[in-house]
Image (cartoon, grey):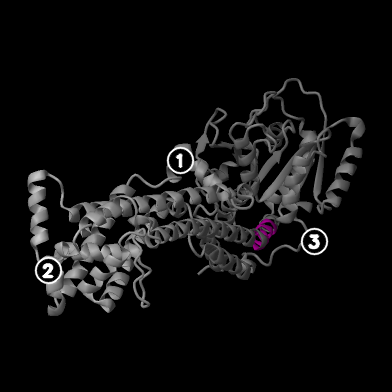
């Protein structure tokens, strides 16, 4: 096992935990969190893992800087060949150009460095999103130069690519001009180099002859003030060139060329650059990864908040159904009328005749086409319960939508779903009607089964036969909606109409204790069926969260992975990391 396997394995484990969409919700500054995730993932893929996998591979020096800083001209001048195309139009560098020595061509043409960028060889500028690899005979082996896009490009993709390339560098050659060295954008990148202890050199170009030394002195002062004191600083004077794409005279870039050649030729110097940059990048993970873990925690908190809001909305919908089930409202109107038909408003004994009333009703129905009172009551009950379920589901959906819209994460998800889908979420689903019908019919069947089971006892069988199973079942259904039930007895209230009569009939058929037990069981079964319906309705909201929620345990896994990297970070081959006070770029 190699000395670096422990560290390399820890980095690969960290990378595995980053291979998810960790910040799908608008929680905190999610855009910054996503950007930090992309940057960290890119540095692992483009630099840390490849470099540790081949610690002795040639160095990659990225030439980066602001628009018009002369990066392409500098690269051409350093290698003594027109390998990168400068110009007056911005952005100039459409695809980054990597210049390598012939001996290192195979290494950089492969996917060892920046594996996500397809390689292009030969003449031409290359397509955006590709890495153009060019061989320069004058460039010594052991060091390659990469001409990066402008860090302040007007094209967002170019700016992001420039940041990605700089994070993949063993060495930064940061290029600025005498006119723009104090701009804020370059200093943002320079401070990032300081925070990650990246090996760095700054090249101040286009310095007027009369300002040589003066501008460099002020830039050195700014570097010191920003914690980059001692950084190697080169000056390139402003020189008249015969044409726009002409190279600088060799004398103008000789100090830079000599310095780079010295690093390329000295294995110890190259190793020091690698150790410094690797060490700084690894050290930065101790801050960057826990920060990502905290951001993941915010995602889970936002997810939990939206789920809680949904649960509360549908719990209130269930409470509304239960209130409607117990307050007697179901037994008004059509149900009350059909109940009175079923019981009979005349002589009570007529309804108690053994099977005679039942047979008479059906004969009348056969010749008149009018359904039996028993059937009409059952249909009225079905319609009333289904209406109550739909009303409860509609109110819950409306409340859930309002709760989501009041929260940033919820609003963002609703916007992603689209106005049409959001409008649908604000009311019950099209499937609810069918679900409610099936639930009510299933519940009625359950009630009839309860009656049959109770009728298995000889002492109640005869009394149930007086009404039939369906009739006795209807009496029990009425009890579910007309009483508070429980062990304290039945409180029948059928809209102030025939409560006493219904109670007497129930007691006459089942007996007091049986009525209490059967009513409770019937009510609980209906409640469970409605809860299941509302849970499926709520899943329309929570399903949006399920589709994007970061994996459980992501935050603890990231913290554990960061700790593992920290424990192994001194396993960099070639010795301990370079001391913080000594920068490889100072050589």
Q: Which residues are magenta?
A: 275-286
Residue 571 is covered by the magenta coloring: no
The residue depicted at 54 percent of the width and 28 percent of the height is 123
Q: Residues within 10 Å of mark 1 (few under 14, many from 20)?
A: few
Q: CA distance from mark 1 to mark 2?
A: 51 Å
Q: Nearer the viewer, residue 65 or 97?
A: 65
Q: Element at badge 2?
A: helix
Kindly indicate whether the residue at mark 3 contacts the one at mark 2 (C-beta within 8 angstroms).
Answer: no
Q: Pointer 1: what residue?
A: 423
For the question of whether residue 527 can be seen, the reply is: no
Give above or below for 202 relative to 339.
Answer: above
Q: CA distance from mark 1 to mark 3?
A: 61 Å
Q: Residues within 10 Å of mark 3 (few under 14, many from 20)?
A: few
Q: Residues within 10 Å of mark 2 (few under 14, many from 20)?
A: some
Residue 465's tag is: 2
Residue 502 image point, x, y percent: 27, 65
Kindly indicate whether the residue at mark 2 contacts the one at mark 1 (C-beta within 8 angstroms).
Answer: no
Q: Pointer 3: what residue?
A: 581
Nearer-N-terminus badge (2/3):
2
């Amino acid at each position: 096992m190699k000395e670096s396997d422990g560290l390399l394995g820890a980095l690969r484990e960290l990378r595995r935990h980053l291979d998810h969409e960790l910040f799908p919700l608008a929680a905190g500054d999610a855009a910054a969190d996503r950007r930090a995730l992309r940057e960290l993932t890119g540095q692992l893929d483009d630099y840390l893992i490849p470099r540790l996998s081949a610690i002795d591979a040639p160095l990659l020096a990225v030439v980066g800087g602001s628009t018009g800083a002369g990066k392409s001209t500098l690269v051409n001048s350093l290698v003594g060949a027109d390998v990168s195309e400068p110009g007056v139009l911005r952005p100039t560098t459409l695809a980054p150009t990597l210049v390598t020595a012939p001996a290192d061509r195979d290494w950089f043409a492969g996917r060892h460095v920046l594996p996500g960028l397809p390689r292009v060889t030969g003449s031409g500028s290359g397509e955006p999103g590709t890495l153009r690899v060019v061989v320069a005979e004058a460039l010594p082996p052991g060091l390659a130069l990469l001409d990066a896009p402008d860090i302040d490009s007007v094209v967002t993709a170019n700016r992001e690519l420039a940041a990605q390339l700089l994070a993949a560098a063993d060495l930064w050659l940061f290029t600025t001009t005498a006119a723009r060295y104090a701009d804020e954008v370059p200093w943002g990148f320079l401070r990032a180099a300081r925070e990650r202890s990246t090996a760095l050199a700054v090249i101040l170009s286009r310095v007027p002859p009369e300002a040589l030394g003066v501008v460099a002195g002020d830039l050195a002062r700014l570097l010191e003030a920003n914690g980059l004191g001692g950084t190697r600083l080169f000056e390139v004077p402003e020189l008249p060139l015969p044409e726009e794409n002409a190279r600088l005279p060799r004398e103008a870039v000789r100090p830079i060329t000599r310095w780079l050649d010295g690093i390329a030729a000295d294995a110890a110097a190259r190793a020091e650059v690698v150790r410094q940059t690797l060490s700084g990048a690894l050290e930065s993970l101790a801050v960057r990864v826990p920060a990502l873990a905290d951001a993941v925690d915010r995602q889970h908190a936002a997810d939990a908040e939206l789920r809680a809001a949904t649960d509360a909305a549908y719990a209130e919908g269930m409470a509304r159904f239960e209130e409607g089930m117990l307050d007697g409202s179901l037994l008004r109107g059509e149900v009350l009328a059909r109940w009175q038909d079923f019981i009979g408003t005349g002589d009570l004994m007529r309804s108690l005749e053994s099977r005679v009333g039942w047979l008479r009703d059906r004969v009348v129905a056969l010749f008149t086409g009018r359904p039996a009172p028993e059937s009409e009551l059952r249909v009225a009950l079905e319609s009333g319960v289904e209406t109550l379920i739909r009303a409860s589901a509609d109110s819950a959906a409306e409340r859930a939508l309002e709760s989501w819209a009041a929260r940033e994460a919820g609003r963002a998800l609703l916007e992603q779903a689209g106005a049409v889908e959001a409008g649908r979420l604000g009311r019950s689903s099209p499937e609810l009607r069918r679900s409610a019908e099936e639930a009510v019919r299933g519940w009625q069947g359950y009630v009839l089964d309860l009656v049959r089971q109770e009728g298995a006892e000889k002492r109640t069988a005869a009394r149930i036969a007086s009404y039939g199973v369906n009739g006795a079942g209807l009496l029990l259904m009425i009890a579910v909606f007309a009483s508070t039930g429980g062990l304290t007895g039945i409180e029948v209230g059928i809209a102030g109409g025939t409560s006493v009569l219904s109670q007497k009939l129930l007691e006459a058929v089942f007996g007091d204790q049986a009525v209490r037990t059967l009513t409770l069981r019937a009510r609980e079964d209906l409640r469970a069926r409605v809860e299941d319906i509302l849970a499926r309705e709520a899943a329309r909201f929570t399903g949006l969260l399920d589709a994007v929620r970061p994996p459980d345990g992501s935050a603890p896994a990231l913290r554990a992975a960061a700790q593992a990297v920290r424990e192994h970070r001194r396993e960099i081959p070639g010795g301990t990391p370079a001391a913080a006070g000594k920068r490889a770029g100072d050589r």
